[in-house]
Image (tube, grey):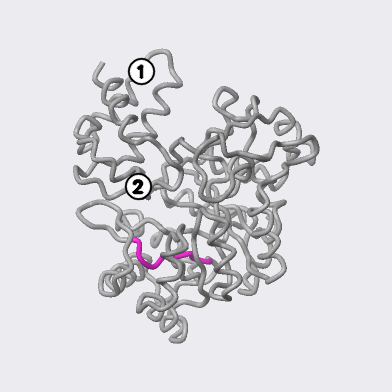
Amino acid sequence: MQYRTLGKTGLKVSEIGFGAEWLGPHSEEECMTLFKICEENGINIVDCWMPDPSIRRKIGNGIRANREKWIVQGHFGSLWINNQYERARDLERVKVAFQDLLTCLQTDYIDLGMIHYVDEEKEFESILSSDYLKYIQDQKAAGVIRHIGMSTHNPAIGKLAVQHGLVEMILFSINPAFDLLPPGQVSVDNVTEDMVAGGCKIDPVRQEFYQLCQENNVGLTVMKAYAGGRLFDAQRSPFGVAMTPDQCIHYALTRPAVASVLTGFETVEQLQQALHYCEASEAEKDFVPALEKASRNSYVGQCTYCGHCLPCPKNIDIAMVNKLYDLAVMHEELPDSLREHYRNLSVHADACIQCHACEKRCPFGVKIADRMVKAAGLFRQ
């Protein structure tokens, strides 16, 4: 395992990290196995944006024996209300959720205290003078968090954070498909830069953001490097060929200021696929052949299962429904295993009332209500 310095935090983080949001359905034993393999192979950073206490406790149990060896990325304002994720800035709820994070993780400190999910300039400006930010800064002054970071999908907001000097690092979504898109645009008609042979000619604002991070020593950790797994499917990839985990990880690690790629794995096989990067040849890492066939398509409009669409007034687990639906449509016949997983959901897609509130919160412009109708029809068969 190779390690990189995470910007001005000075922390040495493993190039491969653990994005642990999919631990929920898995047993304690399965999760402990994943953490054991991570430790044996030098993975030392884990993200916990997920407010679900069951996931937080599994992470806590996984890192408990060697807490000092783990760098934890924990978020302020990610709440679990009525068994659903909510994002909040009001101080009292933020305090309760953060104390729950510490309790579940069985720790008295968080290495990277994250300003959670800021994608709009108006919201960023409001945070600067808020009790929410003061509370985070107070936690750093008290040593409860060691460094302040932020998560965003919008490079324009990332630039503001760097220019303001607010954060020491940023969690940002990076893959070759997303890099085509200007900030704030959700249509493929707005993709103005094409991939070219020899690499990706990315949107200028994204390029400026990466360079600004490099110049100001603001480190980047990466989410969504696989674009929800779609880059592995030639039929759904905008590049016309299936990319590999090695290629996706290498693409992200070659962006300026990137220190660690937090890969989302929930099985030993997926973890081993990510770890293969550590021993991959230069030919195996080379992503150029995939990008040479780039089209003007992108992953805007497609679910990456991030959960920011919640809360749903009918308590639908939208990300899980979308994940099961996407897996199902890859088969000619609906597998019994997927049907059973869907059946075991506490609320099904047909509960959707078409209010479209979720779509206003989706960072990627997914037509969620339409997908709920399609999922309901598919799994009703």
In magenta, the rendered stretch is 71-78
Q: Tell whether 246 sits left or right of 155.
A: right
For mark 2, what is the residue?
Answer: 360
Q: Nearer the viewer, residue 353 or 48?
A: 353
Residue, x 46% and y 41% (percent of image)?
304
Q: Quadrant of the N terminus?
A: bottom right
Give how far apart the Cα atoms at labels 1 and 2 are.
Answer: 31 Å
252 to 118, vertically: above or below: above
Query: Tag 2's secondary structure?
Result: helix
- Write the residue at 41% across / 81% down: 139
In primary-sequence order, the first of circles 1 and 2 is 1
Q: Position of residue 78 (x, y in %)?
A: 35, 61
SS at mark 1 in the image: loop
The kind of residue on which mark 2 rests is Lys
Of residues 207 and 192, which is closer to you in this image?
Answer: 192
Residue at the image point whose x is 42% and y is 28% from the top: 326
Q: What is the residue that sits farthest to the top in this orientation?
A: 332
Residue reaching furthest to the bottom: 142
Magenta region includes residue 166: no
Q: Position of residue 338 (x, y in %)?
A: 34, 26
| Crowdedness near tag 2: few (<14), some (14–19) or many (≥20) residues, C-alpha within 10 Å | some
Q: Is residue 358 above or below residue 348?
A: below
In the picture, the disc for residue 334 is 1
